[in-house]
Image: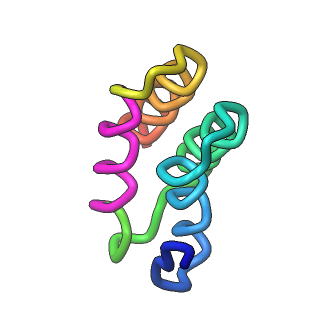
Amino acid sequence: MAHQLPKHPIYQSIDHLFFHRNPETRQQGAARLGEGAPPLSVEREVLEALTTALDDPCIAVKEAALQSLVRLSIR
């Protein structure tokens, strides 16, 4: 049975970041989390997902997560 997160659209990116084996899908999830300012209701989950992604074994995922964190920090 697949893991199910709440239905807010941003959770699809978090799902891609955490639960996909494909590094490119995880990278895309990390990059999408840095697009736009997340609503306050999900901001904590976004920040937790991106900081957790800094431990991903794929360097491209780490870089995408770091870039997203930087983009979010300057908003």
As for residue 46 lying within the magenta part, the answer is yes
User: Vertically, is 63 above or below 41?
Assistant: above
Magenta region, residue range: 44-54
- Image check: 61 left or right of 53? right
Which residue of the protein is positioned furthest toward the bottom in this rendering? Answer: 7
Q: Quadrant of the C terminus?
A: top left
Please name whichever residue, 36 or 52, is drawn nearer the observer in this view of the structure.
52
As for residue 27 lying within the magenta part, the answer is no
Instruction: Please name the predominant secondary structure of the magenta segment in the image.
Output: helix
Picture quadrant where residue 55 is located: top left
For image coordinates 47% across by 77% down, the residue present is 5
Color style of the picture: rainbow
For image coordinates 42% across by 28% down, the residue present is 56
Residue 25 x %, y %? 70, 42
For image coordinates 47% across by 83% down, the residue present is 6
Please name whichever residue, 45 or 25, is drawn nearer the observer in this view of the structure.
25
Q: Quadrant of the N terminus?
A: bottom right
Residue 72 x %, y %? 43, 41
For image coordinates 56% across by 74% down, the residue present is 2
